[in-house]
Image (tube, helix red, strand yellow):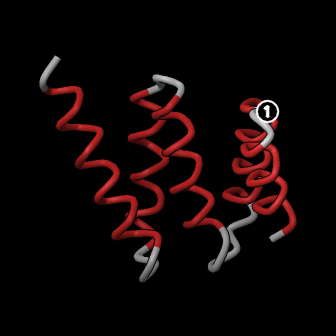
Amino acid sequence: MATYNLGMLLAEQDDVEGAKAAFGQAIASGHAEVAPTAATKLGALLAEQGDVEGAKAAFGQAIASGDAEAAPTAANNLEVLTRKHERR
């Protein structure tokens, strides 16, 4: 939980690299309540940075978790990202 909260704080402070690392640690923890949400947040952060493949992978992790909140959010974010990049 602490690494997820740190990721959120660092993202708010525009420390993208720090946020990516913290979210990555939260995902790696495998914590059932934190890892899926961290994957969704990481996907959004990567998408903002233009890392489409990284964002897709992170969203995919959140979707695969089956988490009741993170999975649908990640699925929606993935759909929006995919549509955005299909138009290019």
Residue 59 % position (x, y): 42, 51
- Total count of labels: 1
The C terminus lies in quadrant: top left
Furthest-top residue in this view: 88
Q: Is residue 57 above or below residue 71?
A: above
Image quadrant in which you'd find residue 75: bottom left
Furthest-front residue in this view: 13
Position of 9 compared to 59: left or right?
right
Q: Is residue 62 above or below residue 21?
A: below
The N terminus lies in quadrant: bottom right
Q: Secondary structure at mark 1?
A: loop
Position of 25 compared to 34: left or right?
right
Residue 44 % position (x, y): 50, 45
Q: Residue at the spot x=71%, y=56% of the render?
A: 28
Q: Residue at the spot x=47%, y=25% of the render?
A: 51
Position of 68 compared to 10: left or right?
left
Furthest-left residue in this view: 87
Image quadrant in which you'd find residue 73: bottom left
Q: Residue at the spot x=80%, y=39% of the render?
A: 13
Image quadrant in which you'd find residue 6: bottom right
Residue behind mark 1:
15
- Neighbor class of circle 1 (other Cα within 10 Å; few <14, some 14-19, many 20+) is few
Residue 2 % position (x, y): 87, 66
Disc 1 residue type (three-letter): Asp
Furthest-bottom residue in this view: 68
Residue 10 % position (x, y): 81, 44
Q: Residue at the spot x=39%, y=53% of the render?
A: 60
